[in-house]
Image (cartoon, rainbow, N blue to C red):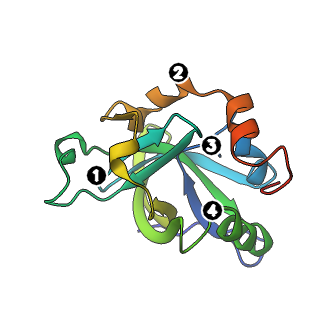
Amino acid sequence: MKKFRNSKPAQHLVFVYGTMLTNCYNHHRVSDQKFVGVATTAEVFNFSYKFSPRQIPYVWRPTKADDLRHYAAPVTGELYAVDADTFRHLDIREGHPYVYRRERILVYVEKAGRLDPVECWAYIGNRFDHSECVKASPECGKHEWLDYYDSRLHYDTQGHRAGAFV
């Protein structure tokens, strides 16, 4: 398994699949960090998002108790090498370990026509009521949820306007 090496100290590889993706509201959290590439999880996840009142995408591991476990599929996202300060701020912004849990996962990064396995961090949904999700399907993990994403709604309804999560 390859580990990304960079001349900067304390680099952490972080897989993003939701609002930190390029062109989404929270991309500014990683936009000044090194983009490693497009990546897909080796493990399957259930992918859901809450459309109202907030647009929060999240993944969780399917369990035998999940009614939606048949929707589990690999999730596609972006891989970033982030510095220690950004890594610490991501934990705060993602509510680790309460809202999302930061966990080690394996992803495949697309490089020169091949898929390289890379171990990295990802934020896995922790305290979400799956019954409140709008959609849970393999297509969500391929960014189909972006068809419904509205950065203004995200901003207005999550407390960003009041500065709570800036």
**Label annotation for residue 147:** 2
Residue holding disc 3: 19
Q: Residue at x 16, y 42 (%)?
A: 70
Q: Type of residue at label 2?
A: Asp
The answer to whether the residues at label 3 and label 4 have Cβ atoms under 8 Å apart is: no
Q: How many marks?
A: 4
| Precedes in sequence: disc 4 or disc 2 | 4
Q: Type of residue at label 1?
A: Val
- Nearer the observer: mark 1 or 4; the answer is 4
Q: Position of residue 46 (x, y in %)?
A: 31, 48
Residue holding disc 1: 44
- Residue 90, relative to residue 112: is it above or below? below
Cα–Cα span, label 1 and label 4: 21 Å
Q: Type of residue at label 3?
A: Thr
Cα–Cα span, label 2 and label 3: 13 Å
| Precedes in sequence: disc 1 or disc 3 | 3
Q: Type of residue at label 4?
A: Glu
Q: Residue at x 41, y 65 (%)?
A: 105
| Precedes in sequence: disc 1 or disc 4 | 1
Q: Position of residue 103 (x, y in %)?
A: 46, 71
The answer to whether the residues at label 4 and label 2 have Cβ atoms under 8 Å apart is: no
